[in-house]
Image (cartoon, rainbow, N blue to C red):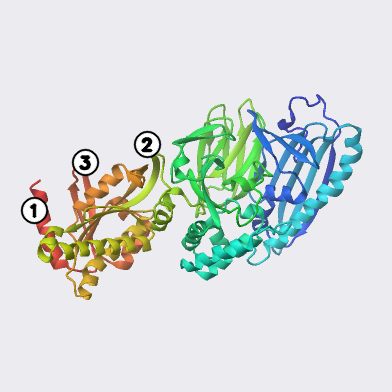
Amino acid sequence: MYNTIDNPWFLVEGAPAMPAPTVNLSATIDLDAPPERLWPLLSDTGRVDRAIGIPAFERSTPAPDLTFFVESHYLGFPVAWREYPYEWVFEQWHQVERAFEPPIPVRWLMTRTTLSPLPGDRTRVEVIVRFEPRGVLGRLAAPLYIGQKLMRDLLRAYRSFADLANAAGQVAPPPPRRPVVSEARLGLGAERLRELGVAAALVERLAAHLRTADDPDVVRMRPFALADAWGADRLEVLRLFLYATRAGLLDLEWDVLCPNCRGPSVRAPSLAELASDAHCGTCNVRYDVNFDESVELRFTVSADVREAADLSYCIGGPANTRHIVAQVWLPPHSVRELRFRLAPGDYRLRTRQMAAWARLRAAGGAGENAAHIRLGQDAIAVSAPDLAAGQVELTLENDADAGLLVILEQTAWSAQAVSAAFVTALDEFRQLFSAQVLAPGLGVAIRNLTFLFSDLKGSTMIYDTIGDTQAYARVRDHFEAMKAIIARRRGALVKTIGDAVMAVFPSAEDAVEASLEIQREFTAGQIARGDPPLRVKLGLHRGPCIAVNANDLLDYFGSTVNIAARVQNESAGGDVVVTPEVMGDPGVRQVLDRAAPAVETFRRELRGFSRTFTLSRLWVDGIAVEAAGEALELQRAQSAQR
């Protein structure tokens, strides 16, 4: 049994040398839902606190000992308390401890909720409340209030969440009172969305969500998370949110996320307000901002459409940091065992008090199901870093002279996050929000994007053969066709340079699909329409880059961009030349298996780079092979003369 009296968190300034008598309360209920369905709801401690009447905090100040000093009001009176870090183990238990300032008639209080599986997909939930009264009023009134009201309200909330866990199509608890909504503005915005071609079913789903969802569920919405809850296509829901912002239903903002707690350190309405680095007050760390993981796009209902209070009821509960599997306090020179389910993936074990960390990996198949982890003064040693996914046992041993808050977290970022790298590489975002650019002179790192460069082969001959007017029209039409294909494959045309195109894709798979479709369009497609085929040269490369503001447009620079441009020069026209970074992508391999292009591998030195590159040339469906072969022979001869 967890002993609150012995917990080092309570050795705080002003606490009595000897603990006063404590009050111990407990209750148990059985719920008709398994732990894996209950955990996301019962661990949402902010929503639970709101349901049982805990006041939202108005100000919180972090302290060096990892606690927060919280100030608020309750029944019109000012209240303040010191909140210690939440502890939890995924799908098993969570607890929090608070030390209250006078005149609250309780010195400190701990609540712990434990979930134990029962047969038949049921769960036994045990709630333990321990507290130390303050003064005569505390000894008389606190046990009655906490035992009769707080415990009753908490169990009632848990029962309602169990009903929600079993309700089909319900994703969150309903609001405690009817939201104030401008039906006229909501209806007008929905009509504008339908006129813009957004699917009517999605428009109705969004309108119903904005009309009936609880305040926390319409503030800083994540489109991909809602898409998953609705059973809808993620990109279609993101498109819905982008157009809804232009229609006045939503406001967008950029959250700059801490790499440790992954909470927002900065919230900005535009990219121009971002800086190259940020500071997290909770973790007391400064970090570089990158578009892949640091910057996430979220949406909030417009204040003109609905009133929604953006209040915080919980600082560090499990629902605030879903990537953390376990967070536990380990006293100095102590040992603690944890048993829990570990999903396949990569994990990091760290503490809040020292910089050292250790890697763990869980994979399917054979492997260890237990590991001993020794935490020293400045190092962490793991006996078996590679574990079998499933039930595991971790033995944590603290050799340090100080207590440690130990954290085991997934290293992969949430697949439900719409990163800045992803959304700014979408054509519709660039069209709808062309003013969303970085501040001049600021470059933000992106870890992985795929770049497409194209050029028209023999365009001078086209102008000479059919005249300037008709040639210009063909070149212009070729730009429009390429832009449509790129957008259809979830990419964005960044800019045109003469007869050339620069485009960007979040996915290498989509970039290859678009390239193959472009070549089909300008060979077989042109011939079918009675036009002579255009010879388009295409090159693809994937890797890190820098996003910048170039003449009030979001542009990209770096070696990856330069290599992609040089790879395009190796195209003969009618083919697609790609680098190993593209060919090695698992999604690209699936595309090539379906499309079955002829593949030729060759080595070439690219202008401006000292090393030799291994490149792959994709011939699309054997289209125009003879003509392309002639061009290729000419290009090889030219390369040999360099």
Query: Label 3 sits on what residue type?
Result: Phe
Residue ID at (77%, 50%): 52
Query: Label 2 sits on what residue type?
Result: Gly
- Judge depth for marks 3 and 2 and give the one in front: 2
Q: Quadrant of residue 621?
A: bottom left
- Circle 2 sits on which residue? 441
> Horizontal placement of 610 versus 211: left or right?
left
Mark 3 and mark 1 in contact (Cβ < 8 Å)?
no
- Circle 3 sits on which residue? 609
In this view, 71 is above or below 597: above
In this view, 608 is above or below 345: above
Q: Secondary structure at mark 3?
A: loop
> Horizontal placement of 373 versus 73: left or right?
left
Q: Secondary structure at mark 2?
A: loop
- Residue 542, position in %: x, y? 32, 50
> Horizontal placement of 458 versus 425: left or right?
left
- Residue 427, position in %: x, y? 38, 57
Q: Is residue 412 visible?
A: no
Count of number-bearing discs = 3
Q: Residues within 10 Å of mark 3 (few under 14, many from 20)?
A: few
Alpha-carbon distance for marks 1 and 3? 20 Å
Question: Of callouts 1 and 3, which one flags the residue occurring earlier in the amino acid sequence?
Answer: 3
- Circle 1 sits on which residue? 637
Alpha-carbon distance for marks 3 and 2? 26 Å
Q: Quadrant of residue 85?
A: top right
